[in-house]
Image: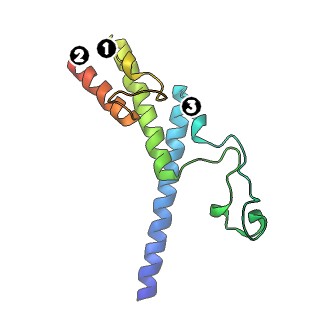
Amino acid sequence: RGVGVVGLGLAASKLIEMRLDQRVDFEVDLAAKLGIDITDLYYDFDLPADGYPFGDGEEWMPASWKPAKIGDAKYLPTKMLGQLGTRNKMHVVLEECTAKSVDVSDLCVPFEGYEGEFGTNVKRLTEMKRRLQEAK
């Protein structure tokens, strides 16, 4: 009886993981279609494997523990999904703002050195939506 419950839990976990991967792939494809640069979400260099105390980690570590290689995602799938989804939504809302002449230029600035109240993409997206709603 307990084995069945554990097996059911493992199966459900695997299905959830597969669905999450599908959603990330969908958002990656959408970003490509929209022309959004997402290269900053992936490693552009190999992380060294020689820092492990028992020799080269490449030989004995499980795949999920191995150091990242070029092209590997910097974040776990849940964070990747959030990052990609927010960027895709921002792109669509920004196009709507441009079409309706809603000024969001103060929100379309790099984060480096930014000291305003909209310090995350989610806050900026929310503000863009608010301004767009006010313009209607």
Q: Which residue is mark 2?
A: 135
Using the rendered image of the protein, determine whether residue 136 is visible from the camera's viewpoint: no
- For marks 3 and 2 on the same chain, the one whose residue lies earlier in the sequence: 3
Colour pattern: rainbow
Q: Is residue 25 left or right of residue 119?
A: right
Distance of mark 3 from mark 1, alpha carbons? 25 Å
| Helix, strand or loop under label 1 | loop
Marks 1 & 2, CB-CB < 8 Å contact: yes
Q: Which residue is mark 3?
A: 32
Neighbourhood count class around disc 1 (C-alpha, 10 Å): few under 14, some 14–19, many 20 upward: some
| Helix, strand or loop under label 2 | helix
Q: Is residue 87 left or right of residue 73?
A: left
Identify which residue, 16 or 87, lies in the foreground: 87
Q: Give above or below for 30 relative to 99.
A: below
Residue 105 location, x and y as percent? Answer: 39, 16
Asked which quadrant contains residue 42, the reply is: top right
> Which marked residue is nearer to the observer: mark 3 or mark 1?
1
| Helix, strand or loop under label 3 | helix
Distance of mark 1 from mark 2, alpha carbons? 7 Å
Residue 30 location, x and y as percent? Answer: 51, 34
Residue at 23%, 23% in the rendered image: 133
Neighbourhood count class around disc 2 (C-alpha, 10 Å): few under 14, some 14–19, many 20 upward: few
Residue at 48%, 63% in the rendered image: 15
- Kind of residue at badge 3: Ala
Residue closest to the far top:
101
- Kind of residue at badge 1: Val
Distance of mark 3 from mark 2, alpha carbons? 29 Å
Q: Which residue is mark 1?
A: 102
- Kind of residue at badge 2: Ala
